[in-house]
Amino acid sequence: MRFMLAASAAALLLSTSALAQNAGSSGDKPKSLDAIHSEQMIEQAKSGYADAPVDERTVQTRHSASVGGRTIPYTATAGTLTIRDVAGKPKASIFYTAYTADGASSAGRPVMFFYNGGPGSASLWLRMGSFGPMRIQTGNPETIRPAPFNFGANPDTLLGSTDLVFIDAPGTGYSRPLGDAKGSDFYGVDQDADAFSRAIIRYVTKFGRWDSPKFLFGESYGTTRSGALAYQLQDRGLALNGVILLSSIMNYGRRQPGLDRDYLNYLPSYAATAWYHHKMANAPATVDQAAAEARAFAQGPYAAALEKGQTISPEERHSVALQMSALTGLSPEFIERANLRVDLSRFRKELLRSERETIGRYDSRYTGVDPDAAGESPDYDASDTAISGAFIGTLNTYLARDLGYQTNMAYRASASEEEGFKWDWNHKAPGARFPLQSPDTALDLAAAMRQNPYLKVLSLNGWYDMATPFFGTEYDLNHMMLEPAQARNLQFRYYPSGHMVYLNPDALHSMRLDVERFVYDAVGEARGGTPVAAPRRRH
């Protein structure tokens, strides 16, 4: 044993001496044993990195779903798509999960591509909570208990009408840059849309879906992506049948300081929230009516008052504050002190201050409790913390156990976990001479709709969404300056829920029927294979 130790020491000494001589011959100082050991450990660590695969990976499992009394056998695919530059060089490995009905002809069977927003968010929220064949069971509204989670079959899956593909953006989920590509190559409005365009075209090509009716489904910043992506896909020869926008933000320009548009956009959402929490004076019977009253006020007296800025008379300021108070539940004094311009964080803190509660941003039905009731803004978003642990925990189990996707990589809920994450907001819109520093991809979507007269758009909105208020969505989409023929292809739907409409089981059911009707109208009866079923009308 001592001989072996001595031999090892001698070998190390010789190795060290050789390395020192080599270093000395180049004019460098000899390396210490600690430095040599550190370098060896770094090389060992590199060999153990959990890298995304360059070669596309496909893991398939067989399942069945019950949809409207029908049993639909389907194949679940968890895998990666390798996107390449124009020279064919691999740039990124894109992770996805797909659910395709067995025995259906791709010629008549629609396929819908889903993604969340952020920017920089993985698509776990839509994958685990919306229209997949399995979902986490959520209440209305409530904090989900820690594990074990209530996860199971989804009676409101869209598999009865379309195949589903959920895609994680580069740097999120298991999607990663390849080779010498960096995350920053994809972290931007146009860079991100380009990556998704390449991934979708790759999926369509790999699985022979060029003859399938094709739809996009984006949530939150995913709707910003959808505007740019619809135009990019069409420009590259992939024409879409429909685009579905859930909880939209298309035009970031209206958020710039000094502009009053966002105060107008939020007013109807404030009124809907006040109605829900019984703070609205002379409240109408329904939230729809509350929103309608607030829209009329916002477009009329409120818009006129804000337009006057500091030149508004004291009498008009007081009159508008009284009307605004009746709609929003805030005191006239508070509104006047805020110059008629109440920021979202202040509203979330002020509405239930007397109850010592705050309201959520993603969903204003949720309430939270701060250490004190005197602050300027809530300490956290109760509608976010109420669900995050359950969604992330369920996803990790589902991918490994149910879909059989095994990897040593960590699933990233957000690319913002990466050090130095920064988003490039510049956007080159169709027809624009210079890049927009604050993107408006409604311009891209409008161009796509003009060029493709068959492209239909469905806007889905939650009354209690305070992250992307529905009145702002209406403004963005109603300012695409479409001709009547194209404007008829644009529809709006509303639900008693928040940003993630699907958290409300009743709203999810209604939304599923609306999406099915939209697909049916955009495509009609599928030719062969599993038909696109016309949804039952609600009474």
Image: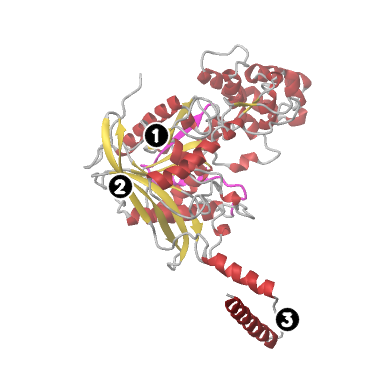
- Pinpoint residue 425: horizontal percent, then vertical percent: 60, 50
Identity of the residue drawn at 45% across and 54% down: 407
- Reply above or below: 149 against 230: above
Can you say which quadrant of the picture contains the C terminus? top left
| Outermost residue to the left | 528
* Residue in the foreground of this view, choosing between 16 and 309: 16
The location of residue 23, given as percent across then percent down, is 67, 83
Left or right: residue 118 versus residue 330 is left
Q: Residues within 10 Å of mark 2 (few under 14, many from 20)?
A: many
Residue contact at pointers 2 and 1, CB within 8 angstroms: no
Q: Is residue 420 left or right of residue 535?
A: right
Tell me the residue that label 1 is attached to.
152
Residue 2 seen in this snapshot: yes
What residue sits 54% from the left and 21% below the top? 292
Q: CA distance from mark 3 to mark 1?
A: 63 Å
Q: Magenta region: which residues?
A: 435-463
Secondary structure under tag 3 reads loop
Give me the disc on residue 212.
Answer: 2
| Mark whose residue sits in front, 3 or 1 | 3
Horizontal arrangement in the rendering, residue 291 relative to residue 311 (left or right): left
> Dot 1 surroundings within 10 Å: few (below 14), some, or many (20 or more)?
few
The residue shown at (60%, 49%) is 416
- Mark 3 vs 1, N-terminal side: 3
Which disc number belongs to residue 29? 3
Of 315 and 350, the residue lying toward us = 350
Q: Where the N terminus falls, by quadrant?
A: bottom right
Residue 15 on image: x %, y %? 62, 82
